[in-house]
Image (cartoon, rainbow, N blue to C red):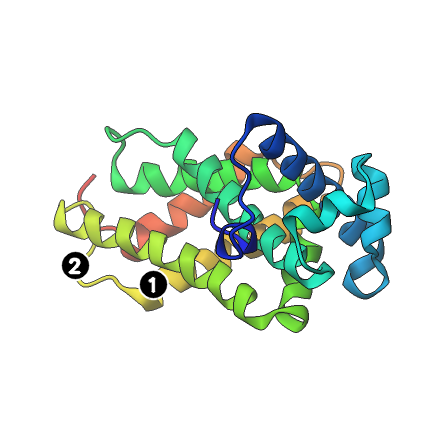
Amino acid sequence: MTSDVAMTGKEPRTDRGRKTLRKLLDAATREFADHGFHDASISGITRRAGVALGTFYTYFDSKDAIFRALVSDMSTGVAQAAREALDPAMGALEIERVALRAFLAFAAEHKEIYRIIDEAEFVDPESYREHYETIGSRIEERLQAGGEAGELAQGLGSVEAWAVMGMNVFLGLRYVIWAREGDPPFDVIARRANDLLARGVGSGHS
């Protein structure tokens, strides 16, 4: 995990320490999701985590520091969800379909990600920007690899990658955060979005 914990030299070196850090991050997720950054408190985080106040400062210097670490942790979670769902044998378009399906499932399990990432725009703009730039870069690499393999159009780059990312983010907003009775299942949403990609960026090969 790349976070303020590692950058400040407070990264735990034992299993017990890693479990305590995980408890603090999970507790911070609930605290920030329930109260927002400004009304959330360190004491609220430690109470939820079931640890002493002093334990918090073993890992983080401030509320800002754990918030930045949490944004990084969520970005890592999004990447891991996609990575675990993908198979190197998949074609380029199938990879995008499966990656979107994995993101929707991750967001459904961690709905607080939308509130926390959105709040990061104002609390810590650098983390907010890094979150999206990292995802955009991963998508761009996949699109370029698909172009090189002849499965997608040639010359796809940052513009197309950010367009795909924007589509995925707003599909999650509509069908996870604002889900309604009768909405199509995630598999159907991912397939329909993939059909749109196939017509928009496919090379024309079936």
Element on which disc 2 rests: loop
| Kind of residue sitting beneath label 1 | Glu
The structure residue drawn at horizontal position 39% and vertical position 35%, both measured from the top left corner, is 83
Q: Find residue 200 and report its image quarter.
A: bottom left
In front: 25, or 78? 25
How many numbered circles does the render carry? 2
Of pointers 2 and 1, the one earlier in the residue sequence: 2
The residue wearing badge 1 is: 160
CB contact under 8 Å: marks 2 and 1: no
Q: Quadrant of the C terminus?
A: top left
Circle 2 packing at 10 Å, graded few (<14), some (14-19), many (20+), is some
In front: 51, or 111? 51
Residue 27: assigned label = none
* Mark-to-mark CA distance, 2 and 1: 11 Å
| Kind of residue sitting beneath label 2 | Gln
The structure residue drawn at horizontal position 53% and vertical position 56%, both measured from the top left corner, is 8
Q: Is residue 109 visible?
A: no
Element on which disc 1 rests: helix
Q: Is residue 160 left or right of residue 148?
A: right
- Where in the figure is residue 195, as x and y percent of width and height? 39, 45
The structure residue drawn at horizontal position 34% and vertical position 38%, both measured from the top left corner, is 95
Q: Is residue 154 visible?
A: yes
- Where in the figure is residue 173, as x and y percent of width and height? 64, 53
Q: Is residue 37 left or right of residue 129?
A: right
Task: Answer above or below: position of 203 versus 92.
Answer: below
Task: Answer above or below: position of 45 versus 35.
Answer: above
Residue 154: assigned label = 2
Circle 1 packing at 10 Å, graded few (<14), some (14-19), many (20+), is some
- Where in the figure is residue 49, as x and y percent of width and height? 78, 37
